Image (cartoon, rainbow, N blue to C red):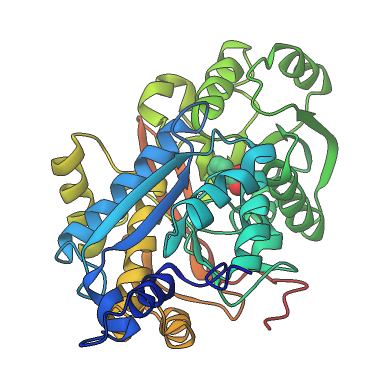
Amino acid sequence: MDFAKGLPRRSILQAGLVAAGASAFVPTRFAIGNTAKVKVGFLLPYTGTYAGLGEAITNGFKLAIEERGGKLGGRDIQFVAVDDESNPAKGPENTSKLVSGENVDFVVGPVHSGVALGMVKVVRETGTIAVIANAGAGAATGPLCAPNIFRTSFTNWQTAYPMGKVAVERGLKNVVTISWKYAAGEEALSGFEAGFTKAGGKVVKQILVPFPSDEFQANLTEIAALKPDGVFTFFAGAGALKFVKDYAAAGLKSIPLMGPGFLTDGVLKAQGEAAEGVLTTLHYADALDTPENKSFRAAYAKAFGKEADVYAVQGYDSAQLLVQGMAAVKGDTSAKPALIEAMEKSVIKSPRGTFTLSKAHNPVQDIYLRQVKGGQEIVLGVAEKGLADPATGCKMA
Ligand code: BEZ
């Protein structure tokens, strides 16, 4: 039997030294680990409809690390990246490439909820600490929650539920909902519907299209025929860009368009006039007038020559979470219970506003109401203050 199988890489290294008779000085496991680089594995999309999101998360993460001295717990960092292609079928395999193939200390990602479910399956088995930097699948901090799984982004429910009440307050009673047919879209639509029906509204039709299709013409024709008071939608990345443009081109702009802020975040400039009036709820807005947001946005623009968005913020905050955890254990990744405890207690001074984590390891955060006016994302107010996901089914071991 290979006794080293399943041991952490550093244990294997130490075992090797002892077996080779390096008897004069056998460093402790931490002494060896402390000099090695910390390995951070990005499980993110670098191709396809969510490619821009993966890049923004990576940039945001690296920016936060650079600003904090380029280390984690005093140790240098080695980054390894796997393009997850937003392909749920490859989620477990791509996670294993990082966890078993590369022996990473941390997995950061993914964007796509379906990929997240595959990743969660693997890290629940290996115990590798994962920081979900976008994917909003409720199950990851619900029935599949675990001590080693953290999220710095949102649940799909969190970004959609608050819009239900807003829609009714704006006199929208009959609404059509439309999204891609996968966990993120379905959870966002059902989150909206829960808030909307509670406030007295009615969803007259739910339309689901395959991911990542951006052929919306037939659906837009159907919406025009239904003549709803409003349309609620979840799309993100290149799909969001296309949907908003097609919606305007189909002559539907007289029907208010709503959704989680992914509908415009990162693609607003490219959407141009078509995005005018779009109403969204999200845990971030470019225009937040706080010192943290202003300095973050300026530093991001300087470093990468482009505007930051919500995905960059989530990458930035994922790094902040690891910085705080690793500082508490002075870089000793083998002190896992202490590392996890420090991460649980983190207070993240985010560009979105300061947030903490719930017992299920998901942000408790304000959800802003935003609207595009004159080509800018304007903050109309806070739709829900300190919103926590219900985390139904989460039982921490
Ligand atoms: C998701 O799959 O969870 C997701 C993807 C893009 C934006 C927001 C959520």
Q: Name the residue located 62 percent from the left edge and 51 percent from the top edge.
A: 116
* Residue 254, image x, y percentages: 62, 23
* Residue 173, image x, y percentages: 78, 43
Up/down of 271 relative to 54, above or below:
above
Up/down of 183 relative to 381, above or below:
above
Quadrant containing the N terminus in the rendered view? bottom right
* Residue 356, image x, y percentages: 45, 77
Q: Residue 243, located in which quarter of the rendered image? A: top right
Q: Name the residue located 54 percent from the left edge and 29 percent from the top edge.
A: 240
88 vs 363, left or right, is right
Given residues 58 and 195, the one toward you in this image is 58
Quadrant containing the C terminus in the rendered view? bottom right
Q: Residue 350, located in which quarter of the rendered image? A: bottom left
> In this view of the protein, can residue 99 be seen by the observer?
yes
> In this view of the protein, can residue 278 be seen by the observer?
no
225 vs 270, left or right, is right
Q: Name the residue located 69 percent from the left edge and 71 percent from the top edge.
A: 391
Up/down of 95 relative to 212, above or below:
below
Q: How many numbered marks have been drawn onto this rendered protein structure?
A: 0
Given residues 242 and 212, the one toward you in this image is 212
Given residues 176 and 121, the one toward you in this image is 121
Given residues 385 and 108, the one toward you in this image is 108
